[in-house]
Amino acid sequence: MPRLLRYLDPRRSLASALGWLVVALFLVFALVAALWLGGMARTSLLQQHGRQLALSTGQLAAELDQALALRLQSIRAVATMLRTDLGSDTPRALRAVLDDLRFTYPEFEWIGLADAKGTVVAASGGLLEGSSVAERPGFARGLKGAWIGDAHGTVPLHKKLAPLPGGEAHRFVDMMTPVRNPQGRVVGVVDAELSLRWIRNYVQGLRETLHLPSATQALVLDKDGLVLIGPDALQGKRWHGTQVKDIAFVDATQAFSGASTATSAPALERLDDGQVVLVARAEPSTGSTLRTLGWRVLLAEPADRAYQRADALWLHILWVSLGLGGSAALLGVLIARHLTRRLTALTRSVQDVGRGKAQRIEVPSGIDEVARVGAAFANVLGALQLERSELRTLSAELEQRVATRTREVERLAKETRYAAVVRERLKIARDLHDTLAHSMMAMLTEVRLLKKLHVHDPAALPDELAHAEQAAHQGLKEARAAITQLRFNAVRDVGLGAALADAIKLFSERTGLAVDYSSEPRAASFADERAETLFRIVEEALRNVERHAMASLVRVSLRDAADGRLELRIEDDGVGFDSSASHPGHYGLVGLREQAQLIGAELSVQSAPHEGTTLRLALDRGPNMWS
């Protein structure tokens, strides 16, 4: 609470001082405008608007009543023209009279002439001739005098007429008047059906004639309170409004109630959907067609529209307030200029520091916001200057460290490139051992044998020369195959399983050895760089079998082991060897172990003299091992 009081103290806060001034000025202006003009505008508006709405309602009801009375009068005129015995004229002549009336008033959907028993003897267009209207509610009254009534649901005429647009049902206002012969005796009735659709259009035309706003709804209610004519959303529904009390509106209705009119005083009503509307009802006079029909005419418009004229007055109030506010603002500017002179000086000092013209901020004296802001700026400036000095020192140290790290990275890059070169050299050495070294060894053996044969058995030289030539061709073929493997990577293209199948097939065809090869689908799909190394290990192992094992059967299996590793096994039933003994000058097993170590595989060789050899490779399965 003490902190809030200090914040609201105008002696401590420039914003509070200006705020108190503006609030005080505008509060006085708003109270004066609301109390003086607000109530007067509301009452005056309702009086004028209510009177205008009531007059429009009465005029609309009078025009509609006159239109209906005119059509009823036309029916009476036709009945007067037919003052003769109905049997004296032919139905054709009677029909011509009725057709002429319908031509004059096309809003009549049907006009008929019935005898005293209710049988239709003539009708416009010949519709319903011969049918009976005796059961109609208005027939008995029509024999006694002119009558008008709502004929909804009692006329089968809609079955004879063309359907209305939108599937709307036909509805009529029934008009009847008696036909008397020259002796004054009633001999029949003239019956006419006036289209309710025409009445609806007529009311719409009256709305335009009276220049009613689009928001004002013109409604005609039947005797049961149902909406006959009005907006589509309300037609056929019961009008139900609860009166809303408003003090200013009561004053307006009291001022209006003294006028002599057939229209009831307007009232505010709340509809079922919550909307508040201003309603004016026209009370039909005794003997009018509307009173006979039991219809009531009313105009309804949203209550908000009744206050539209108040907007103009409130706008005037706004301009007055703006004028007064402008004067107050001018005074406030002068006061603010006096109050903010110290703030201006502080701003100038800060700008000088920003431009480099000064090194320190001149802090104003006092305890208000200007003094506190100046002190804060001075503290921030001192902290920034200190941090800038420290940042320069750190930047120099960082540059030195970056230079050192750069040299270290360059050294490591050179070592990495050298390691890559060494790996490529080892790979080429292994390939040469697997191809050219074996071929050269075979050719060397043949040359030594040829020397011995030249001394001891010259006759055997041709056959051995042929063997030597065959060994040379085989070496050339293996060298070309090695070069092809450097250019074409079958393992990457088709997978380890398929590449092994092709290589084993070629091995079996070349050597004549039986090879039992099996692979599991998942293991066969292995196709990354480690698969290439496994393929080369198998090739080297098969070459060793061909040259040294003297086997009759070879088994090669590739599977996904239960421990989650890839397992490759190569077995033969050859002469075997002592796997624990060293073999100086022979690098076959050494090369196989080196290749296994490069890919992180575990290599084991089991062999003994005359017991064959088993070579097993196990490779850990990685997250991207399977293609």
Image (cartoon, grey):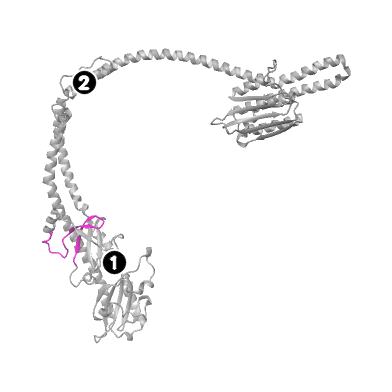
Q: Answer left or right for 229 relative to 343.
A: right
Q: Quadrant of residue 581?
A: top right
134 is higher (above) or lower (below) than 610: below
Residue 17 visible somewhere in the drawing: no
Question: Residue 280's x, y, as percent?
Answer: 19, 60
Q: Residue at x 30, y 59 (%)?
A: 233
Decide which of 439, 28 is in the foreground and name it. 439
What is the three-letter code of the residue carrying label 2?
Gly
Query: Mark 1 — residue?
Result: 199
**Spot occupied by residue 540 in the image (x, y as percentages of width and height):** 68, 24
Residue sitting at 55 percent across and 30 percent down?
Answer: 622
| Three-letter code, disc 1 | Ile
**Element carrying mark 1:** helix
Image quadrant occupied by the C terminus: top right
Nearer to us in this view, 158 or 214: 158
Nearer to me, 559 or 341: 559
User: Would you identify the image quadrant in which residue 470 lies?
Assistant: top right
- Of labels 1 and 2, earlier in sequence is 1
Q: CA gap, disc 1 to disc 2?
A: 82 Å
**Could you say which is closer to the camera, residue 18 or residue 487?**
487
Mark seen at residue 374: 2
